[in-house]
């Protein structure tokens, strides 16, 4: 039982990171109907921003409450960097191609992804870096041997807060309403006077900054980062987005959690070697029976 | 347009062949090739071994060279990938026409490069690959370190006799020939000596999340975990083990040997853990201390075992060439096989029939991020 509780917790903290990355995939798909394959690498840039900001602020050795403030500051910094990166990528690369066939944009996205990965190897170096320990990890809860540390709790809480924040933006604000309108029908939305370009830029900024936050949380939990670290989490987050129903925000969060838990349980109870094979096999089964994903709605193509 | 296309292909082909043909090495130089992971997850392996080897070459050249010629070292980065290792070894032999090859540290990469050396009949010396299969590839492949069946015995004895622990869990990297090989030898040896393996878990190099495996291990209540793996993964494993409340000692092997092992939070996480390796920098032996002094003067950092071993690999290669009186690969190979009681910085090196070196191992303890000498185990 102790082992089970611990495993559930391991899975949730891994899943919340997948969920944050998946949100970016799903938002951009919702607006532009295309998969931004460079999203996993934006997540990597977020982790590296945190790494360099951590070194920059290393002179201020803080502890206790102040270290939480510092960690928040660094996360905010990383979110700004990745938000700006997302904005730039969209403006420079995707916008000129908006009228091109979907396949062109898709291939371009793969190009941007490779550019960030190998450009990162050139700039940051290919060897893994040790992520600065922004927060001290204290054992928080001890449930008859199942030790739950403070860092995984911080990851879970931060991810939760960000997701609720996103939900509020999308459902309660004017720009959120505009986003939903563009997602529903871009042409009609622009006829209603909605500035489509602004909405698309905003979506990229929000999605990318969430990936940046995920990069910091990842670094907190697994403090070893390298320029190729975004590939696998990016792929898994993409699958999480599809599993939850691509274009659907709560679906992405749910999908991320399911993938995190599945991976942890397969590794812990079956075999680490078959982790991805079994986890993804289960996904194929779910999608066979529910092709639109768990929370996705069926779209009717208008002729 | 089509003609232009074909003539461009033809031109490129000509250019490639001319370039590849021209690096023959002038008559007054002996070309020696080296391949190693200068970048990538195990970068310190390649950097340290290159540094050690460069030092050996530099000293030799300063002392007048070899066979009245200067030795020139050509080093290529294989990024720690077996496929790249094959490519660069091919390039060393075919394009650069080296007379001998030194490398790699990781057994998986040595196993990729060795068959090419064997086919081309170029002697290869691996400084630190301990997997027995590496030298079994052929009679041109040598090593200057001990092999894993011995290392498994050393670790088993240490856990049972010195630490007095009987219940051990095993965590291995399934993508890595060194890790799986050493894990298998350990499992057999430890059971033979009366120990018990309570859990075997695995991961794939590059994984970042090990909590699921560690949680399963924790549920079996072992007294220690043996992790034959490379330092980058061990760094993360140790941090996560402490995070889920696993406080037992982690025991490792020579793949832990890197200053990056205790980087970041792992400094505390690995406190009081042990690993087996080739040499201790605390050893008062003048040969060792002299090497440390020279290395520090040149690179401004402490050498690790990979630097020591690569230096020795260079020394025995030069010794064999001196004895052969030529760089003819076959004669050098024959001389390498006859090396006996050669004093290197990692101790006396004697090459046996399987082209392996028979040497003692040391156990180091991690204290405050430093590697402290614990004990020596004779073969």
Image (tube, coloured by chain):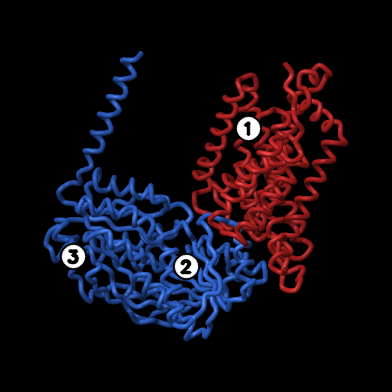
Dot 2 surroundings within 10 Å: few (below 14), some, or many (20 or more)?
many
* Residue at mark 3: B320
Q: Is residue B344 left or right of residue A208?
A: left
Q: Is residue A178 left or right of residue A19?
A: right
- The part of the image, by quadrant, that contains residue B138 is bottom left
Q: Nearer the viewer, residue B295 or B157?
A: B157
Q: Nearer the viewer, residue B362 or B299?
A: B362
List x then y, in percent, for residue A47: 63, 49
Q: Same subunit under labels 1 and 3? A: no
* Residue at mark 1: A89
Dot 1 surroundings within 10 Å: few (below 14), some, or many (20 or more)?
some
Q: Same subunit under labels 1 and 2? A: no
Q: Which numbered mark, 1 or 2, is in the foreground of this view?
A: 2
Q: Colour of chain A?
A: red
User: Which residue does the image show at 75% across and 58% down from the upper left?
Assistant: A154
Q: Colour of chain B?
A: blue
Q: CA distance from mark 2 to mark 3?
A: 33 Å
Chain where mark 1 sits: A
Chain where mark 3 sits: B
User: Which residue does the image show at 68% across and 54% down from the upper left?
Assistant: A261
State the quadrant of the C terminus of chain B. bottom left
Q: Which numbered mark, 2 or 3, is in the foreground of this view?
A: 2
Q: CA distance from mark 1 to mark 3?
A: 58 Å
* Residue at mark 2: B228
Instruction: Work out whether B325 lies above or below B287.
Output: above
List x then y, in percent, for residue B244: 67, 67
Chain where mark 2 sits: B
Q: Which mark is residue A28?
A: none
Q: Is residue B293 visible?
A: no
């Amino acid at each position: 039982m102790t082992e089970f509780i611990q495993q559930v917790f391991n899975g949730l903290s891994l899943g919340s990171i997948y969920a944050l990355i998946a949100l970016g995939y799903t938002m951009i798909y919702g607006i532009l109907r295309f998969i931004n394959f460079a999203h996993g690498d934006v997540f990597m840039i977020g982790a590296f921003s945190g790494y360099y900001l951590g070194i920059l602020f290393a002179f201020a050795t803080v502890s206790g409450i102040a270290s939480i403030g510092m960690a928040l500051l660094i996360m905010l910094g990383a979110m700004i960097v990745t938000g700006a990166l997302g904005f730039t990528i969209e403006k420079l690369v995707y916008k000129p191609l908006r009228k091109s066939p979907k396949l062109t944009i898709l291939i371009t996205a793969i190009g941007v992804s490779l550019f960030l990965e190998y450009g990162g190897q050139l700039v940051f170096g290919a060897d893994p870096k040790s992520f600065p320990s922004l927060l001290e990890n204290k054992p928080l809860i001890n449930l008859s041997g199942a030790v739950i540390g403070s860092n995984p709790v911080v990851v879970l809480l931060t991810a939760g807060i960000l997701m609720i924040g996103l939900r509020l933006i999308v459902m309660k604000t004017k720009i959120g309403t505009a986003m939903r309108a563009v997602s529903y029908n871009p042409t009609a939305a622009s006829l209603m006077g909605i500035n489509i370009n602004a909405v698309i830029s905003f979506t990229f900024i929000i999605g990318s900054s969430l990936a940046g936050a995920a990069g910091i949380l990842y670094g907190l939990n697994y403090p070893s980062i390298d320029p190729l670290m975004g590939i696998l989490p990016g792929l898994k987050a993409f699958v999480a987005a599809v599993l939850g129903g691509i274009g659907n925000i709560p679906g992405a969060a749910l999908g991320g959690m399911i993938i995190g838990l599945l991976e942890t349980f397969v590794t812990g109870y079956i075999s680490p070697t078959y982790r991805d094979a079994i986890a993804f096999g289960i996904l194929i089964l779910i999608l066979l029976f529910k092709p639109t994903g768990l929370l996705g709605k069926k779209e009717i193509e208008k002729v | 347009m089509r003609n232009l296309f074909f003539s461009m292909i033809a031109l490129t082909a000509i250019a490639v062949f001319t370039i590849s043909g021209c690096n023959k090495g002038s008559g007054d130089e002996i070309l020696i090739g080296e391949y190693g992971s200068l970048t990538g997850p195990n970068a310190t392996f390649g950097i340290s071994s290159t540094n050690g080897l460069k030092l050996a070459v530099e000293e030799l050249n300063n002392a007048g060279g070899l066979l009245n010629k200067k030795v020139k070292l050509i080093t290529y980065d294989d990024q720690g990938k077996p496929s790249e290792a094959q490519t660069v070894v091919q390039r060393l032999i075919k394009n650069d026409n080296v007379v001998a090859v030194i490398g790699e540290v990781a057994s998986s990469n040595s196993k990729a490069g060795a068959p090419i050396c064997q086919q081309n009949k170029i002697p290869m010396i691996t400084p630190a690959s301990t997997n027995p299969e590496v030298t079994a590839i052929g009679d041109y492949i040598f090593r200057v370190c001990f092999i894993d069946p011995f290392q498994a015995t050393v670790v088993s004895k240490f856990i049972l006799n010195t630490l007095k622990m009987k219940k051990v869990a095993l965590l291995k990297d399934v993508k890595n020939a060194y890790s799986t090989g050493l894990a298998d030898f350990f499992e057999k040896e430890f059971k033979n000596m009366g120990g018990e393996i309570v859990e075997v878990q695995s991961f794939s190099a590059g994984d970042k999340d090990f909590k699921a495996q560690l949680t399963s291990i924790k549920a079996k209540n072992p007294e220690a975990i043996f992790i034959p793996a490379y330092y980058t993964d061990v760094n993360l494993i140790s941090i996560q083990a402490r995070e889920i409340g696993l406080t037992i000692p982690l025991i490792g092997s020579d793949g832990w040997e890197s200053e990056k092992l205790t980087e970041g939070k792992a400094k505390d996480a690995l406190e009081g853990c042990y690993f087996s390796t080739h040499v201790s920098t605390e050893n008062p032996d003048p040969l060792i201390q002299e090497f440390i002094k020279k290395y520090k003067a040149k690179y401004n950092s402490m050498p690790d075992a990979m630097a020591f071993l690569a230096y020795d690999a260079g020394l025995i290669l030069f010794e064999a060439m001196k004895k052969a009186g030529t760089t003819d690969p076959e004669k050098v190979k024959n001389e390498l096989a006859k090396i006996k009681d050669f004093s290197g910085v990692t101790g006396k090196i004697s090459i046996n029939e399987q082209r392996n070196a028979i040497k003692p191992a040391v156990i180091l303890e991690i204290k405050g991020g430093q590697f402290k000498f614990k004990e020596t185990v004779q073969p």
